[in-house]
Image (cartoon, helix red, strand yellow):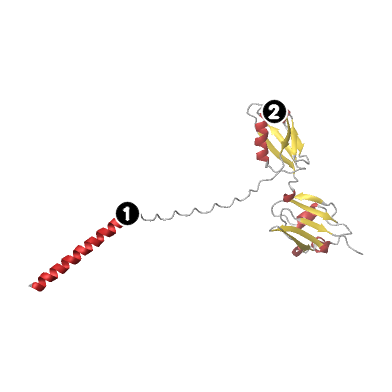
Amino acid sequence: MRAFTIANRTAGGWLALSGAIFGFLLLLGQAVPAHAAPAPTAAPAAPTIPGNDYIIGPGDVLQIFVWHNPDLSASVPVRPDGRISIPLVEDIPCAGKTPTQLAREIEERLRKFVQDPTVTVIMNGFVGLPAQQIRIVGQATQPKALPFRTDMSVLDAMIAVGGLTSFAAGNRSRLVRMVNGQQVSITLRLRDLLESGDLSANAALQAGDIILIPQTFF
């Protein structure tokens, strides 16, 4: 009987102690605020992909059409300073803009003279900025800068400049290109391409490429 009483008292003591510990932990949890979970890190913004719209450059020829105002419409070249002038509005900066951007700016300027003008800019002649050009220099029949277009190749460029002169060292030609800020030079076999029809000598072009065609040495 005494053993049973001691056992009851021991069990009761453990229960009391357990309750006290539980209450202490509960109070401690209320007194010390739990650390908030870290806020989720925002995903990095997607990189801006440049559009494929044509960028106006010096030497381009623009057809400016002002709806219901033929006297304000004009065909104008882009001057070397990258500007144009049309009736009522002078010295409009346009190099580096798309035709749509330029049309909106002309509309804004014409609002001083015309109620709700609607302007359309049409490209009549393409040159573009230097970074959009393919430049062929040296012993080409007609060395010139060409506006780059999608899927343009060395063969396309050589057709546009009329091929090689009789003094050209076609197979020693070089393609100069900027890659990650570094200038890279690639050998071109233009003589094989143009005279033998060797299409393995053809190559895809990128905007800004320069084709250098040296003179042959006899």
Task: Using the image as rendered, state which of residue 91 and residue 149 is in the foreground.
Answer: 91
Kindly give the residue lying farthest to the right in the view shown: 218
| Residue 104 to residue 207: above or below | above
Q: Residue at x 81, y 50 (%)?
A: 144
Q: In front of the other: label 1 or label 2?
A: 1
Amino acid bearing label 2:
Asn
Q: Residue at x 77, y 50 (%)?
A: 146
Task: Using the image as rendered, state which of residue 71 and residue 107 is in the foreground.
Answer: 107
Task: Using the image as rendered, state which of residue 98 and residue 20 is in the foreground.
Answer: 20
Q: Is residue 54 left or right of residue 196?
A: left
The reply to whether the C-beta atoms of the residues labelled 1 and 2 are less than 8 Å apart is no
Crowd band around label 1 with a 10 angstrom C-alpha radius: few (<14), some (14–19), many (20+): few
Q: In this view, does 169 lie to the left or right of 205?
A: right
Disc marking residue 69: 2
Amino acid bearing label 1:
Ala
Q: Residue at x 83, y 61 (%)?
A: 170
- Residue at which label 1 appears: 31
Count of numbered labels shown in the rendering = 2
The picture places residue 171, in percent across and down from the top left corner, at 82, 64
Local SS, label 2: loop
